[in-house]
Image: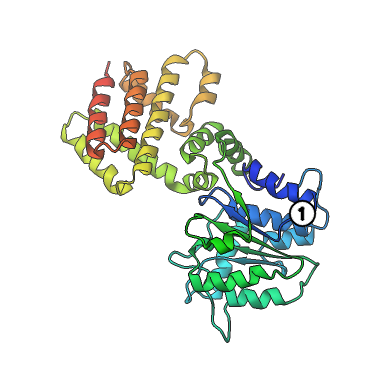
Amino acid sequence: MLSRVIGQEIAKKQILNAYRHERLAHAYLIAGDEGLGAEELAVEMARFLLCAKPDRERFEPCRQCANCRKVSEFQHADVHYYFPTLKSTDEETMRDMLQAKANELYTRVYIGGGSIHIGDPDNPEKNSIRGLARETSLRSFEGNKKIFILTYVNEMNDEAANAFLKILEEPPPTTFFFLTATRLHTLLPTIMSRCQVVKLSPVKETDIQNALITEKNIATGEAQLIAKLANGNYGKALELIGGDLNRRRKTMLDFLVASVSPQSTAIVQAVDAIIADTEKDKAAITDILLIMLAWFQDIFYISHLQDHPETLKNSLINHDLTERLEKFVRNFPRTNAETAVFEIEKAVDLISRNVYLNLVLVNLGLNLRHLAIKK
Ligand SMILES: [Zn+2]
């Protein structure tokens, strides 16, 4: 069922049920945080609606016909993808951004500080509401349906939103709108009342993990860690693959090395580095602590599964750092990994309750120093 979108069964069923009963609304507003799949669901629906031979039992576009391919490449003449830009954004930049999204559907296509704006009255640009008004008045090129996807509509200003409302109020026949919004409370209620609202929900951890393994060839242990850190957001999981995970893991290892260092100032310096690297973002610091948790879980496995090498290999989350883990166990053979896990969980909890960040991290470092016992 629209399988390029990870999870979101309820949202998919809401739209597809209407489709099955031939009651597809002419406008849907898909709402949810970035990375949950709002734009992606809109693109999947465009593919499904225009596909030459869709699987109507399983609700999948064929992904091979000319229509599917053109929609996937953002080059279908009847599918228009509008996203926030600045007035100064040139068309080449817009094309590059859509090309990136064609390569990885979950790529964020958005220019910071931009919005879908009203557009020039005489010569309306792409991505503007006046441009949209012109497009909706033209006949479709390749079929009878025209699809307009407008993203981040909650960031449109009132002028653009009101002009768009006029188009929504008199929808051209066989035209479908899929709007996406990251927040509903900043959207004009007049627009909302013209749309079927579809709310997205967090994606199940196992769904994210499976998608990472099958779509991105990520090893099981790493996929498990990323899925946990992604906190129900597939877009965030992809960012973690793209580098955030390795950076955060390095910060975590620096902190661990400092914690077991004989120099008492090392912990304070490592904590300062974490604070600087994360800009005091509690979510980012929590990620680092969860990565540390996975590290001690691995330490626990290595200490307890030495007679079961095959099970051990499949259980390790940081399998790519096996040598480093083994070295840690050799250097600190009497480390109490279970208590370390407990201390880290306590630190995560304190951070969520707004306890002073430096204090929590310095204390954690000192506790780990006591727990990592040399032979
Ligand atoms: Zn197709």
Left or right, residue 321 beside residue 205: left
Depicted 6 relative to depicted 189: above or below: above
Residue lying at 52% horizontally and 63% vertically, measured from the top left = 188
Which residue extends farthest right? Answer: 53
Q: Is residue 105 visible?
A: no
For the C terminus, the image quarter is top left
Q: Residue at x 72, y 63 (%)?
A: 70
Can you give x and y, in whole percent of width and height, for residue 39 in the image? 60, 56
Residue placed under numbered mark 1 in the picture: 23
Quadrant assignment, res 27: bottom right
Element type at mark 1: loop
Question: Ligand 1: which quarter?
Answer: bottom right
Q: Nearer the viewer, residue 242 or 33?
A: 33
Q: Horizontal and vertical percent for residue 42?
A: 65, 56
Amino acid type assigned to the residue bearing label 1 in the image: Arg
Is residue 137 visible to the viewer in this orientation of the structure? yes
In front here: 372 or 234? Answer: 234
